[in-house]
Amino acid sequence: MPIKILQPTVIEAAGNKPKIIKEYVGRVNSGTGDVSIAHMKSPAGWVEPGQTPEFDEYTLVLSGTLQVESKDGIIEINSGEAVIVKKGEWIRYSSPHSNGAEYIAVCLPAFSPDTVHRDE
């Protein structure tokens, strides 16, 4: 039987400024460990610690610009574009521009604080 998700759970985000994470599917909201799907809004100037996650992350930017830093350099993902980050790759997300960023993130397996491995 299909499972209807009535509303997301707002989850506290890491970073220097408040970022909104609304998890629809994942460990917290639906008890799902296979995948997580979250709607995110990060303000202008937001930056989070670097991380080396144990999950693949697929991100679709809905509006604004998400900056993605890896050991290979920095790329900007604009509205209507997407990025794939493979597990085990060091990465740092930010939204440095004045319009911030709004995006959907899908993690396989689901995001977990125990498997994201944030920098100290």
Image: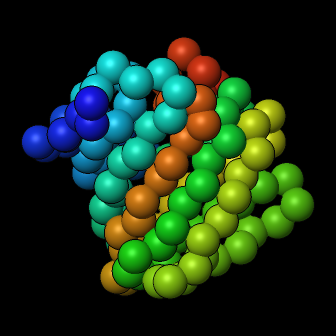
Q: Is residue 40 above or below residue 48?
A: below
Q: Is residue 93 above or below residue 102?
A: above
Which residue is rendered at x = 13% and y = 43% of the image? 7
Q: Quadrant of residue 103?
A: bottom left
Q: Nearer the viewer, residue 100 or 16?
A: 100
**Percent from the top left, x then y, of residue 96?**
48, 72
Kindly give the residue lying farthest to the right in the view shown.
72
Q: Nearer the viewer, residue 11 or 71?
A: 11
**Percent from the top left, x then y, of residue 11?**
27, 35
Q: Is residue 4 above or below residue 111?
A: below
Residue 118 seen in the figure:
no
Which residue is rendered at x = 36% and y = 69% of the image? 102
Q: Quadrant of residue 25?
A: top left
Which residue is rendered at x = 75% and y = 37% of the image? 87
Residue 107 seen in the figure:
yes
Kindly give the residue lying farthest to the front in the view shown.
1
**Percent from the top left, x then y, of residue 106?**
51, 48
Left or right: 66 with respect to 76? left
In the rendered image, the quadrant that contains the C terminus is top right
Left or right: 43 with respect to 82? left
Q: Is residue 65 above or below residue 73?
A: below
Which residue is rendered at x = 47% and y = 83% of the image? 79
Left or right: 74 with respect to 100? right
Total numbered labels placed on residues in the image: 0
Q: Nearer the viewer, residue 5 or 2?
A: 2
